[in-house]
Image: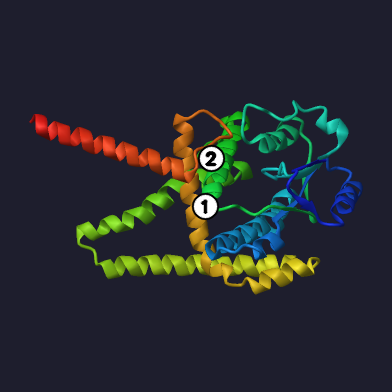
Amino acid sequence: MNLDTDGILQPDALRNLVLYFENNPDIDAAAGAVLTNKKMIQATKRWSTRVLRVNEYFEYLQACMFGRSMESAKNQLFTMSGAFSAFKRETLVSTYMYNVDTVGEDTDMTFQIRERLGKKVGFCYNAIFYVEPIGGVSELYTQRQRWQRGQVDVSSDFLAEDMHIGNFFKNFMVSRLMVDHTFLFPRLIWTIGLFVLVFYGYSAVLILASFVLMYLLYVLFSILIYWQVTRMLIDFKQEKKYLKRKWWVVLTLPLYNMIVSIIRFIGIINMITNSATWRTNNFTNELKVIKQIILDDLSRFKKGKTDD
């Protein structure tokens, strides 16, 4: 097994994970459920950070209890989280171990086991490992860019030949990547493009109504996910009780997801021009860079007008 050093195991986590392997002899590696620490979220004093952390908590719940459970059922788990996962020894020693040439080494290991070795990767939903919640927007900014880079790196290594539209309905990995990455561009462009319509004579009220309608549709989707995740927590009374008290997350989740989408979009742009590294520029540093570029452009523009 591998564990992050800054997390806490749920008391029955190791026993449940071992039982999962014993009851599923065809499983060669498995991920545990990684959630953020509720006590640390509750102890957060700054309200904006607490709201961010609650949204992250629900995101992890959604990804683990809903997403990974579905993926593992068909041996399509995209990533065994490096924070908490386990391997059969003979399977692990058959891999190239963790790849230090990518920041997505846990995803790379998952693909090695399934794609290169032809082994089965599972998910043990009742083995829970609690990690520290996000520190703030700046940490979210660097973390999600790193995840984005890792996904693209690994996908280019293992799925390069399969990445075409003809495999959208045939290959789950291809469809997921296209939805997560390729479709990310038109979604963000359309959202930003709505503002441009004002300059073409469209009513500002109509554009505002469009945003409200989109927001309500995303809230409806969040409610459906919230209901489904709550049902899947039947064996975890504390998690279910906590989530019910945080029902308002369905109202903030669309905004949180939009922020994450924008960060991932920036991550794609940054990876085109920068080499892979764990030291991604944080939000504050990149704002300084942007400000300096704008000032330099203005300076050159003014100089050009003076020369004319």
* Residue on which the image places disc 1: 137
* Image quarter (top left, top right, bottom left or bottom right) of the N terminus: top right
Labels 2 and 1: the sequence-earlier one:
1
Please identify the quarter of the rendering in which residue 223 is found: bottom right
Residue type at mark 1 is: Val
Residue type at mark 2 is: Gly
Residue 108 or 73: which is nearer the viewer?
A: 108
* Residue on which the image places disc 2: 166
Q: How is the image coloured?
A: rainbow
Q: Residue at x 63, y 67 (%)?
A: 226
Q: Residue 274: x percent and y percent?
A: 48, 30
Q: Residue 202: x percent and y percent?
A: 23, 63
Q: Is residue 223 above or below residue 299?
A: below
- 156 left or right, relative to 8: left
Q: Residue at x 35, y 70 (%)?
A: 209
Q: Residue at x 74, y 36 (%)?
A: 114
Few, some or many C-alpha atoms within 10 Å of disc 1 (few <14, some 14-19, many ≥20)? some
Note whether residue 298 is visible.
Answer: yes
Q: Residue at x 63, y 31 (%)?
A: 158
Q: Is residue 84 above or below residue 296?
A: below
Note whether residue 171 is visible.
Answer: no
